[in-house]
Image (spheres, rainbow, N blue to C red):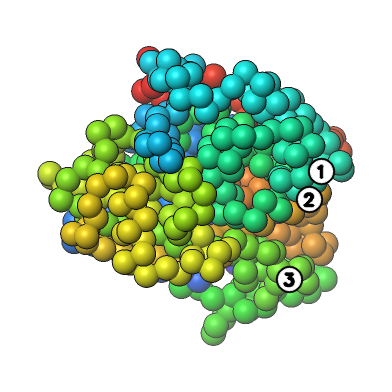
Amino acid sequence: MDADVIVIGAGVAGLRCARVLEDAGLRVLTVDAGQSVGGRIRSSRIDGFICDWGLMTVNPQMPAVHRWVDLSRLDLHFPLAALLVRRTDGPQLFGDPRRVPRLLPSMVRSRMISAADLTALARWSSSGLVGGRVLDSDNDTTLLASLDEFRVRGALREELLLPVLSAMLADSSGTTSAAYAKWVLHSILAGTPGLPAGGMQALPELLASQLRDPVRLEVHASAVLETGGGVEVQTWGDTLRARKAVVAVSPEAVNQLLPVRRPRMQGVVTWWFRTPSAPFSLPVFALDGRGPIGPVWTAVEVTSFAPSYAPPDSHLVAAKTLLDRFDGRASVRVVRRHLAAIYGVPTDDWEVVAHFELPNAVPTHRPPLSDRQQVRIWDDVYVAGDHRKTGSIHGAMVSGQRAAEAVLVDLGIIGALPRRRRALPELYPLQPAASDPAAT
């Protein structure tokens, strides 16, 4: 046999799975069809700029990231724990008062947030969750229906909560699982997300570098077959054999190898602009709270907190549009015009450095939320990926961990795990992360 276990796919889920199996003493062969590891987490270097394919970040407070990633080697850089929200009466900064207390007076004066609205939001966000863990997914409903039920209304809902969640979920329809939306909100509050100095692809590259056996790239798996004494993985020009196989390919390709339903995905478009000057004085993400008047759902000057993304004295702005809307494939002229409205500065001279369209960026989570799907498909074949957990780096890593544990149990290397065991809490306590510069 070529290995004890073959892991197909070198995204975050596959890399975590391979690491757990190797740590248990197994011979693991990890293969990937791409020219580099990372799956959907990719970065391109263009004219001295680093441009991530999607506007993603690393949240160090996510339990899987906190426990299984050597964050010191990523050299994370963080924005301020605040948002620039464009309102009809002008721009307004909103932030987490625990981490950016100086913003609290202006937030109160804005009259956007009332005591009644905050109480309703608190009741909604804590319903069915304890410590960020979903408890009532059986009673799950859509995001909009759930907000209506708890009477979350007004400017807080329309100008802040829904725009933020739409950008994070890559879904502005309001039909996302309310339980999942609450989990995403808790993850935002748990810790400020940041960017690695070398771009987002530095994360999967770090995970791959810690494997004993290097990932074999440009290996295209075309079929996975059980033989009675193990598995065969057919590739373009070769057949690989092992005792077990874990399929951790991209969600849109998983049903090409296994008899599982293709996950529904949400798409995003990421624009990267070289700008002659900083569009705003603080390192914050920006959004339009005035309603869907344009295609941009969130934007940020990346170089305001991660200067390694550009040559010296250069400015780089990233903007995200969503493919769930008719304007997701908006022209550069329309995107520039909306960015000018959000930031209140001219953008005609902003130069496009890169433009990435990702139709399969994140899994869709419709109610009821199902985040603990079966990992064993056949006796010797397993599946992993964020579509089996939650659409996040945390979800992908936990899914890879679970698939590896199932393999180890079936091989008799570890004992059977309790049916309701959770490898990690969903979120650490909602407090500023030690690495969060806004916590000081």
Image point 58% across, 41% down: which residue? 158
- Check disc 1 and report its element: helix, strand or loop: loop
* Spot occupied by residue 100 in the image (x, y as percentages of width and height): 41, 19
Q: Amino acid at mark 2?
A: Pro
Q: Any mark on residue 367, and which?
A: 2
Q: Quadrant of the N terminus?
A: bottom right
Q: Disc 1 versus disc 3: distance between alpha carbons?
A: 28 Å
The residue singled out by tag 1 in the image is 140
Image point 71% across, 68% down: which residue? 262
- Select label 2 or label 3 by which is in front: 2
* Circle 2 crowding by C-alpha within 10 Å: few under 14, some 14–19, many from 20: some
Question: Mark 1 and mark 2 in contact (Cβ < 8 Å)?
Answer: yes
Observer able to see residue 198: no
Asked which quadrant contains residue 161, the reply is top right
Residue closest to the eye, 7 or 429: 429
Q: Earlier in the sequence, mark 2 or mark 3?
A: 3
> Horizontal placement of 362 versus 346: left or right?
right
The residue singled out by tag 3 in the image is 258
Q: Disc 2 versus disc 1: distance between alpha carbons?
A: 6 Å
